[in-house]
């Protein structure tokens, strides 16, 4: 544990942040999507858009993502993830009619 603390401190994280990272619950993309009640594809889109914080692990053929439940909850409370206006099939110039 002391080696881990030293390595983390060398990256600029504080010891209190280390405890939070170690104690937090890590979720896979499917588990995180279930937690947010969205499809995994939507969750990964939000990651690419920067709306949700995620950690990329090295995979053999593709990236493997991990999420902390606290980060998911914070993303929902921080700002609206979904657009505030309802999309419409009507052209914008006809919306006023």
Image: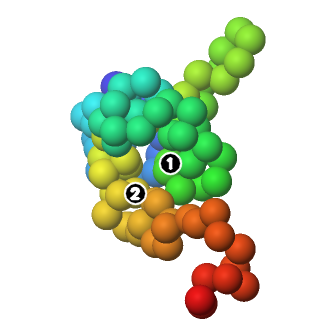
Observer-nearest residue: 38 or 66? 38
The image shows residue 95 at horizontal and vertical percentages of 61, 82
Q: Is residue 75 above or below residue 15?
A: below
Can you name the residue that lies furthest to the bottom here? 96
Is disc 1 surrounded by few (<14), some (14 to 19) or many (20+) residues within 10 Å?
A: some
Observer-nearest residue: 36 or 64? 36
Marked residue nearer the N-terminal end (1 or 2): 1
Label 2 sits on residue: 75
| Residue 26, disc | none
Can you name the residue that lies furthest to the front here? 97
Label 1 sits on residue: 53
Q: Residue at x 37, y 49 (%)?
A: 71
Is disc 2 surrounded by few (<14), some (14 to 19) or many (20+) residues within 10 Å?
A: some
Image coloring type:
rainbow
Q: Quadrant of residue 24?
A: top left
Observer-nearest residue: 56 or 6? 56
Left or right of residue 63, residue 27 in this image: left
Q: CA distance from mark 1 to mark 2?
A: 8 Å
Q: Residue at x 41, y 34 (%)?
A: 33
The image shows residue 49 at horizontal and vertical percentages of 64, 54
Q: Is residue 22 above or below residue 57?
A: below
The image shows residue 26 at horizontal and vertical percentages of 35, 29
Q: Residue at x 46, y 60 (%)?
A: 81
Q: Element type at marker 2?
A: helix
Observer-nearest residue: 22 or 24? 24
Q: Element type at marker 1?
A: loop
């Amino acid at each position: 544990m002391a080696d881990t603390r030293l390595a983390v401190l060398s990256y600029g994280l504080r010891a209190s942040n280390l405890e939070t990272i170690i104690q937090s619950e890590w979720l896979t993309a499917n588990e995180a999507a279930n937690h947010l009640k969205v499809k995994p594809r939507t969750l990964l889109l939000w990651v690419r858009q920067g709306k949700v914080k995620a950690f990329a692990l090295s995979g053999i053929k593709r990236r493997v993502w991990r999420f902390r439940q606290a980060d998911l909850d914070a993303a929902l409370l921080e700002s609206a993830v979904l657009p505030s206006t309802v999309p419409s099939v009507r052209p914008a110039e006809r919306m006023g009619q």
